[in-house]
Image (spheres, helix red, strand yellow):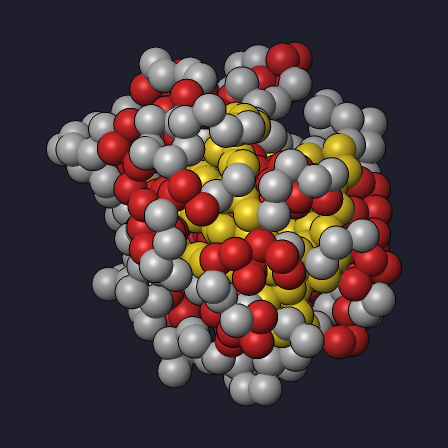
């Protein structure tokens, strides 16, 4: 199997892309990714792109055709992928697979989402409806905001099964806002919250669904943004003129999908997620004990806890406590979501999985902001999900050797 390296990573500031059109976003993502290493787009042999809500919110399909409008990419094997909130991770795996089978030695993975209008405003009900399309039809009936409702149910189940409190889960959001303060690309880097604020039902912070524990501060953001990774084999790095010692290797990767219907399966211990993560570890010949950098898919705080368990840093039911104990801090046992996570960095759905991998690469290269840099980073794990803990894309990263 060919070894795969990250030659370049670029992301926009997450939050609002304002007047940028979808074609402009795609071109900017490609061009800026190439600019990071001083190569033209023509140096790329293949590519994949993903945006989960683009057809519904922006009335634009055939995104691969937009990629081909960037000079140098016309006529090349490009494709669009969609896997709900795991779309970005799926785009990365798509490029890896292409390189493995010999469709070139260099490729680009692009992910983006444009969820707000040109003035930065959003239609909350429309977005709630569109996101609901990624759930099982019978489970969205009667729910205005489908995914907050579904994950409010998951949060209640997690609390009841393991004796976890709202405060335990809120501690995840508080830490992530503290991290985002130092990430210049984070959507919420001008906002800080205390545990009392995260728990108090007042003003902005409210229970999202009556009778269920999920609050506003437990939720990720509605976000515009894009992210890009250029991947290469060893032959591809030589072609791009990028020294291997300046790169990060994607040493392990895997994808697995559980049934879309949430009912009837143990969403607190998702089979596919654990299988994908363990497969990635096995491929990398590594274990959770080796990991001290991670980015997990905290679309809601309960997923920050479950994600901590999936990557193997806590036993089932102990993920939230890992954060309460300070072990997930940048200076803790394993710096988890030092980027701010989806809750504070932002969640431009198609870009999220790419940004997780890209930020982890920055950590392993020692290039994260000083306040967030993990000391002596060794191995990184990422866990990107789509739907009601349905689609899982996992990776394990290490410095190139």
Picture coordinates of residue 371 (x, y %)?
39, 81
In the rendered view, would you say 301 is above or below 70? below
Nearer to the camera, 187 or 192: 187
Say left or right for 217 vs 389.
left
Picture coordinates of residue 129 (x, y %)?
44, 19
Say left or right for 345 vs 352.
left
In the rendered view, would you say 244 is above or below 21? below
Picture coordinates of residue 334 (x, y %)?
63, 76
Within the image, what quadrant is residue 292 found in?
bottom right
Give the residue displayed 57% in from the left and 23% down from the top. 134
Give the residue displayed 50% in from the left and 29% down from the top. 76
Evaluate whether residue 89 shows in this view: no
Picture coordinates of residue 160 (x, y %)?
72, 49
Nearer to the camera, 240 or 330: 240
Give the residue displayed 77% in from the left and 32% down from the top. 258
Evaluate whether residue 32 shows in this view: yes
In the rendered view, would you say 363 is above or below 28? below
Within the image, what quadrant is residue 195 found in?
bottom left
Give the residue displayed 70% in from the left and 40% down from the top. 102
Say left or right for 61 vs 321.
left
Q: How many marks?
A: 0
Task: Please state, as top left, top right, bottom left or bottom right, where the C terminus lies in the image.
Answer: bottom right
């Amino acid at each position: 199997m060919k070894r795969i390296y990250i030659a370049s990573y670029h992301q926009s500031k997450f939050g609002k892309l304002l007047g940028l059109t979808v074609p402009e976003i795609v071109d900017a993502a490609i061009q800026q990714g190439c600019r990071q290493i001083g190569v033209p787009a023509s140096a790329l042999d293949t590519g994949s792109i993903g945006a989960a809500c683009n057809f519904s919110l922006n009335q634009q399909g055939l995104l691969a055709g937009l990629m081909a409008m960037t000079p140098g990419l016309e006529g090349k094997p490009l494709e669009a992928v969609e896997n709900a909130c795991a779309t970005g991770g799926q785009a990365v795996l798509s490029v890896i697979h292409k390189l493995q089978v010999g469709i070139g030695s260099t490729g680009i993975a692009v992910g983006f989402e444009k969820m707000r209008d040109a003035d930065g405003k959003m239609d909350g009900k429309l977005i709630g409806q569109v996101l609901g399309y990624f759930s099982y039809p019978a489970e969205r009936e009667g729910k205005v905001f489908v995914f907050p409702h579904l994950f409010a149910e998951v949060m209640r189940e997690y609390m009841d099964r393991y004796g976890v409190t709202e405060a335990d889960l809120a501690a995840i959001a508080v830490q992530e806002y503290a991290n985002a303060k130092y990430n210049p690309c984070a959507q919420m880097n001008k906002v800080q919250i205390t545990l009392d604020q995260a728990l108090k039902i007042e003003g902005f912070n409210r229970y999202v669904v009556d009778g269920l524990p999920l609050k506003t501060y437990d939720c990720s953001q509605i976000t515009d943004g894009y992210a890009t990774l250029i991947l290469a084999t060893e032959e591809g790095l030589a072609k791009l003129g990028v020294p291997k010692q300046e790169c990060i290797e994607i040493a392990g990767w895997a994808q697995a999908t559980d049934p879309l219907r949430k009912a009837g399966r143990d969403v607190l211990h998702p089979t596919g997620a654990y299988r994908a993560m363990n497969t990635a570890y096995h491929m990398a010949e590594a274990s959770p004990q080796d990991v001290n950098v991670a980015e997990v898919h905290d679309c809601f705080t309960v997923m920050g806890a479950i994600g901590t368990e999936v990557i193997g840093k806590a036993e089932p039911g102990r993920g939230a406590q890992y954060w309460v104990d300070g072990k997930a801090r940048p200076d803790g046992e394993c710096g988890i979501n030092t980027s701010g996570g989806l809750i504070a960095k932002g969640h431009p759905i198609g870009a999220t999985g790419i940004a997780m991998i890209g930020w982890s690469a920055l950590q392993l290269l020692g290039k994260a902001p000083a306040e967030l840099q993990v000391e002596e980073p060794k191995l990184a794990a990422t866990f990107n999900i789509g739907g009601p803990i349905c689609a899982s894309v996992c990776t394990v990263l290490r410095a190139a050797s």
